Image (tube, rainbow, N blue to C red):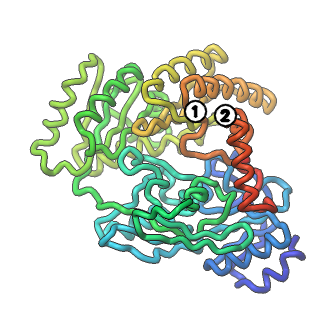
Amino acid sequence: MNKILKPLLKTLSKNEFCTEQNVITNHCIDWRGKFKGTAELIFFPKNVKSVIKIIKFCYKNKISVVPQGGNTSLVGGSVPRVNKGEIIINLSKLNKIREVDTISNIVTLEGGCILQDVNDKLEPLGLEMPISLGSKGSCQIGGNIATNAGGLNVIKYGSIRSNILGIEAVLPNGEFHDDLKTIKKNNTGFDLKQLLIGSEGTLGIITAATLKIYKKPNERIVLVLSTEKISETLEAYKIITKNFGELITAFELMNKFSVNLTKELDNKLKLPFSGNYYCLIELTNFLDIKNFNNFIIDKFSEISFKRMNVIIAKSESENKLFWRIREEIPLAEKLLKNVIQHDVSLPLNFIDKFIEKSSSSLKKLDSKIFIINFGHLGDNNLHFNVFIDKILDRKEYKKIQKDINKIVFSNVVKFNGSISAEHGIGQLRRKELKNFKSADEIKKMIQIKKIFDPKGIMNPGKII
């Protein structure tokens, strides 16, 4: 392949590509270490012109391309497959914030910008991004858009799709799509950016975008409550959202097993009480309420569970400590072997039934099964991960994985949910997608893919 690419490489700067396998290999493994592919070459284009040049060449020569941002995909969406002759285009050098409009509260930025870096630049202006993710220190905006990232603040600001005003992208044939609108109302026919959002790099490479940004809250307080039953947690959610409404920026669910896992990382990550379920709630912009802690306690008196406990952070350091407990669950989980992940969404009124029915069936399947259950209760998103606490060979793992997925996904369907709430499809859920979308939906997705990418070069083997 290097011979085919030689004419292209001559037109690029030496720091815009790499053929060294010790560098490339790190970009061929997904965050969880479950998908390991191969590539002969990785590109690091320094500007949009280079991206166009690379894509045009690959399209002409029918070379498959894997777009990559921070490589934080949890479904194998940002890594190549094995021995398929694919090359990687990593956007980490497209990392400029082009403009911050402090009148309209809009930011225009390139796809390789790291989420945390953007927030650091916005903070002195009293502004912040609408999404917050556990991977904020490494995930990139282009990847966030390509996967329609959700995260911790969806209850307040919506997913990233809800906050995008315009997109700049390079399409599979190398055509430059420039639609960096900075207006909030634009009712002029088909909205093509909506197809690129959530397409996981299969329809093009997102090189820049304009997004809504928000005033950073003047005050922020975190509280944690515990309950014994998931039904009690949902009742608490109902009362808390009724009383606090617009003050809520996050409402996170964690079960006992997932919270206990974080202690393995750091013994400081513990709470002064125990329960089967915990909720982390973040409230903001409450300056006009006097004696806010008393206000919280008074409102919580409406929740009459005998064994419910509540703790309110007394300082910013406690705010951060409570958030660390929630954010480090995936890191703690990563240390375990034999974890089968599920990123599902369900109607709130069915979440308790889903958890109870699925947990019961899984325990019958194997007594060594434990549920790592956490997620964004405020937007119906549950990470329902299954840990098998015993040694399994490859054949045994594949068998129990199939049985576990059958139980979980059949209950997702039964309770009118989705098999992917925010992580996307990637390679991990590609087969399942065909069972959970209608034949007509799959047909239309394939037709759209062919319109954008008739040669099928863009992130092949992902989604469809």
Place residue 205 in its image quadrant. Answer: bottom right
Q: Residue furthest top?
A: 364
Q: Quadrant of the N terminus?
A: bottom right
Instruction: Report crowding for label 2: few under 14, some 14 to 19, many 20 or more residues within 10 A (C-alpha).
Output: some
Give the residue pinned by disc 1. Answer: 385
* Residue 424: x %, y % from top left: 61, 46
Q: Amino acid at mark 1?
A: Asn
Question: In screen coordinates, is 216 left or right of 354?
Answer: left
Secondary structure beneath dot 1 equals: strand
Q: Amino acid at mark 2?
A: Phe
In the displayed structure, would residue 395 be above or below residue 126? above
Question: In screen coordinates, is 219 left or right of 448?
Answer: left
Q: Residue at x 73, y 47 (%)?
A: 464
* Residue 400: x %, y % from top left: 72, 25
Work out how far the residue at label 1 is from the one at label 2, CA to CA, in angstroms. 19 Å
Q: Residue at x 46, y 77 (%)?
A: 98
